[in-house]
Image (spheres, rainbow, N blue to C red):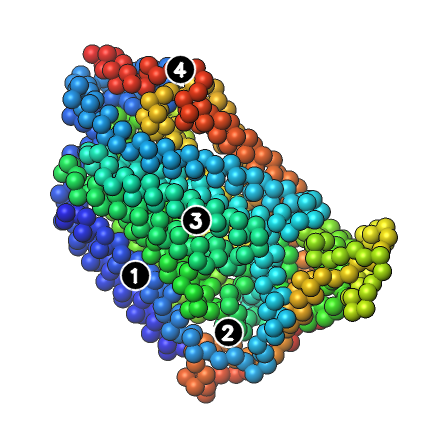
């Protein structure tokens, strides 16, 4: 018992010291940050100009909309010089971004079908049982790994490589390292997918890829950090925008996380369970969340032509996210056979996550407030703002779920699955969709040819995740309540979920349909097929310029 | 490059701190843990069965961690006493699980000690548990005209039995069943003992609770 108290005391003191150190080191920076730092994503006089290459014919209406909300900025204009600089910068990352996003799209479609098949199998348990490779127990981890490492990671990295030169105002350096990293990463995912289908799994959730396949991803992650460092060294901006902090840290965090988690022969029993969820939640908190927030912190202000609400808050949010999020993993093991100090530590830090979440919420939502009309004209903004809202929702829900009283009901149920999808889909994937709609026309210099497909994709995805989340949240809660009731037989908790499992399949079907539409539309742009509409893409800035004058 | 250094140093320090708390400390605290007297290492066949359990993804619906009575009626469902870290010393990888779409299996060998029940249930769960949504595993079995010497035949109730021939259990089904039967943690343990055995022996009380059948 003394050992436990000593550990608790030590970790408390350490947290306190660490927090003080970071507050101290920040306070310098915090006092120095100015409006100028938040405006580093804009060129001279560019504030007040909307930018959304996906808006197509609506670009003029988007500009008019933000002007009627905040008043026209008389000097807002894009100089010829800036236009040329942008074009050079955007072109520097074209090959690696195209490659990463195209591979990500492939994994999105593949992973969606793996997920949908798993969902259907939950209520049709005798469907496709003749082949081991198509069993629920293989498709479910296939879905998780392909979506997270294939789709989400490659989309996040692709968008990061596109934003990086823009944020540092210099062309991307070390492009070949980036390309090699992306190819090796995707090859690793491919090997992992084949291994899982063949029944070779490491057996740990989120870490199913068997050794040595994870090494491919670690090396690929290391390769991708090279262009980051080289471009940073050549930067032409006075200040590193908050998105760079998030992306930079994430690219360093992931290889370390994945390497420690996959060291063979060290982890065992209950200690391995602690490590498993240290990784499982850090890959969300220190890899996907920073990549998603980096995109939201860039695209929301950029589309609206307006710096974020409070730049100081965004930096506070970064450090508190890093500190609190990295220790929440133990909340997956509440009630389990682990040292209680570990679980308590994780519950405390899960609740503390409210701090970074609220800073992000204030910042991103206050930037949009009063400009909701722009959502009608900007497809990018529609996806990204919805994603940012769901980030707030899923994070606060996560903090609540870590409380023992709520966890006692929701642990071991579909409620957790609903929460996970609200995070990875509602938050992360939505933001990536929006970012891809923005980026692809810049990458290919070719406009999205069918705006209606974007609308269809948006509604299928958002209604789909809505049905998915509501079904499993209600079903999971009832399932948990039934399991806690000693008077009710266990089978009650199974039977009562079946209508909600059908609901999940319906939601999943809509999402998959949305992805198919998106993939078709994406292919048309990526290969420059279909009706040629390139005018507005290149001229969006000029058009806005003309409107502003 | 001042900001870059601050960023990378800060980010890595934070990660190191979290790793110390959630990976290194549990390792130091638990790595000398000894198995309870009643817990045997898995046999070769049980380990093969454990590999089938992993390859078939059983973990995605079944936990192996009965909770304390304060958190849920796990013990009264017959899932056994609350588990302790020492129960898992032979578990590589750990299979604690995070879902209970199906029941906890930490003591399934106590609850269902019949080989025939397990084989039939793997072949067609709904023949034994009406309304079950567990997948059937027909690919782990063979349908033969007649059983050969040494074949383990499986009998399932008529609507689920094949029209002709007999069901013979494949090696994976036999191994998996052996593993499931080995899941028996009805031996007594010291509830509070997470540190090495010598550390705090004087205060420990054996907290034995055999799971209800």
Q: Identify the residue at horizontal 43%, vertical 74% (top origin).
A: B30
Say whether marks 1 and 4 touch (CB < 8 Å): no
Residue at the image position 16 percent from the left and 50 percent from the top: A27
Q: Which residue is mark 4?
A: A532
Task: Please check whether the numbered discs 2 and 1 fall on a single chain.
Answer: yes
Q: Total number of numbered labels?
A: 4
Alpha-carbon neighbours of circle 4 within 10 Å: few (<14), some, or many (≥20)? few
Q: Are marks 4 and 2 on the same chain?
A: no
The secondary element bearing badge 1 is classed as helix
Q: Chain of mark 4?
A: A
Binning the other alpha carbons within 10 Å of mark 2 as few (below 14), some (14 to 19) or many (20 upward) gives: many
Q: Is residue A416 above or below residue A339?
A: above
Give residue A279's position: percent from left, percent from top.
41, 57
The residue that label 1 is drawn on is B16
Foreground disc of the pair 4, 2: 4
Tell me where residue A206 appears, x and y as whole percent: 47, 53
Q: CA distance from mark 4 to mark 2?
A: 64 Å
The location of residue A89, given as percent across then percent down, is: 23, 30
Q: Residue at x 45, y 83 (%)?
A: B197
In front: mark 1 or mark 3? 3
């Amino acid at each position: 018992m003394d050992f436990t108290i000593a550990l608790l005391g030590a970790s408390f003191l350490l947290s306190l010291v660490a927090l003080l150190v970071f507050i101290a080191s920040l306070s310098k920076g915090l006092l120095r940050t100015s409006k100028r730092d938040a405006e580093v994503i804009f060129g001279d006089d560019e504030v007040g100009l909307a930018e959304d290459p996906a808006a197509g014919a609506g670009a003029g209406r988007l500009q008019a909309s933000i002007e009627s909300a905040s008043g026209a900025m008389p000097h807002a204009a894009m100089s010829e010089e800036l236009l040329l600089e942008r074009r050079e910068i955007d072109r520097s990352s074209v090959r690696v971004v195209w490659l990463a996003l195209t591979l990500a799209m492939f994994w999105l479609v593949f992973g969606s079908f793996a997920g949908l098949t798993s969902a259907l199998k939950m209520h049709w348990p005798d469907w496709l049982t003749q082949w081991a490779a198509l069993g629920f127990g293989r498709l479910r981890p296939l879905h998780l790994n392909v979506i997270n490492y294939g789709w989400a990671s490659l989309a996040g990295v692709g968008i990061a490589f596109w934003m990086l030169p823009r944020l540092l105002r210099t062309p991307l350096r070390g492009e070949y390292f980036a390309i090699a990293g992306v190819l090796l990463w995707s090859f690793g995912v491919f090997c992992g997918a084949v291994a899982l289908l063949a029944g070779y799994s490491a057996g740990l959730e989120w870490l199913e890829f068997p050794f040595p396949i994870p090494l491919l991803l670690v090396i690929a992650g290391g390769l991708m950090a090279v262009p980051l460092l080289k471009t940073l060294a050549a930067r032409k901006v006075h200040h590193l925008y908050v998105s760079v902090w998030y992306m930079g840290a994430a690219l360093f965090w992931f290889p370390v996380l994945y390497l420690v988690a996959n060291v063979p022969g060290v982890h065992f029993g209950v200690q391995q369970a602690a490590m498993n969820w240290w990784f499982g939640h850090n890959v969300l908190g220190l890899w996907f969340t920073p990549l998603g927030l980096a995109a939201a912190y860039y695209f929301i202000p950029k589309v609206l032509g307006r710096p974020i609400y409070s730049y100081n808050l965004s930096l506070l949010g970064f450090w508190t996210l890093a500190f609190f999020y990295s220790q929440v993993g133990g909340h997956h093991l509440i009630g389990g056979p682990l040292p209680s100090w570990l679980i308590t530590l994780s519950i405390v830090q899960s609740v503390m996550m409210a701090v970074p979440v609220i800073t992000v919420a204030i910042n991103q939502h206050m930037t949009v407030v009063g400009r909701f009309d722009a959502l009608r004209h900007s497809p990018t903004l529609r996806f990204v703002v919805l994603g940012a809202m769901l980030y707030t929702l899923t994070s606060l829900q996560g903090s609540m779920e870590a409380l023992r009283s709520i966890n006692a009901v929701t642990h071991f149920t579909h409620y957790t699955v609903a929460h996970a999808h609200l995070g990875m889909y509602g938050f992360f994937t939505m933001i990536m969709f929006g970012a891809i709609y923005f980026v692809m026309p810049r990458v290919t210099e070719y406009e999205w040819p069918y705006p209606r497909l974007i609308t269809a994709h948006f509604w299928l995805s958002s209604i789909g995740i809505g049905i998915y989340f509501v079904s499993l949240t209600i079903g999971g809660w009832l399932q948990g309540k039934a399991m806690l009731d000693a008077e009710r037989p266990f089978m009650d908790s199974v039977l009562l979920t079946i209508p909600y499992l059908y609901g999940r399949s319906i939601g999943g079907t809509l999402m998959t349909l949305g992805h198919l539409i998106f993939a078709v539309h994406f292919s048309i742009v990526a290969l420059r097929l279909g009706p040629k509409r390139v005018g507005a893409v290149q001229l969006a800035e000029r058009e806005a310029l003309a409107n502003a004058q | 490059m001042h900001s870059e250094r601050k960023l990378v140093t800060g980010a890595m320090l934070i990660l190191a701190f979290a790793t110390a708390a959630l990976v290194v400390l549990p390792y130091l605290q638990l790595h000398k843990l000894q198995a309870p007297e009643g817990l045997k290492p898995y046999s070769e066949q049980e380990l093969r069965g454990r590999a089938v359990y992993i390859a078939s993804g059983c973990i995605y619906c079944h936990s192996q961690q009965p909770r304390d009575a304060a958190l849920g009626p796990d013990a009264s469902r017959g899932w056994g006493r609350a588990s302790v870290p020492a129960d898992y010393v032979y578990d590589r990888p750990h299979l604690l699980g995070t879902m209970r779409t199906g029941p906890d299996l930490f003591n399934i060998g106590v609850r269902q000690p019949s080989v025939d029940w397990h084989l039939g249930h793997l072949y067609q769960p709904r023949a034994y548990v009406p309304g079950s949504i567990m997948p059937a595993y027909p690919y782990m079995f063979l349908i033969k005209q007649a059983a050969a010497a040494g074949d383990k035949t499986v009998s399932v109730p008529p609507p689920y039995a094949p029209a002709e021939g007999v069901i013979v259990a494949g090696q994976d089904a036999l191994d998996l069943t052996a593993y499931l039967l080995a899941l028996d943690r009805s031996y007594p343990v010291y509830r509070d003992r997470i540190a090495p055995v010598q550390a705090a022996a004087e205060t420990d009380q054996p907290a034995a609770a055999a799971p209800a059948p």
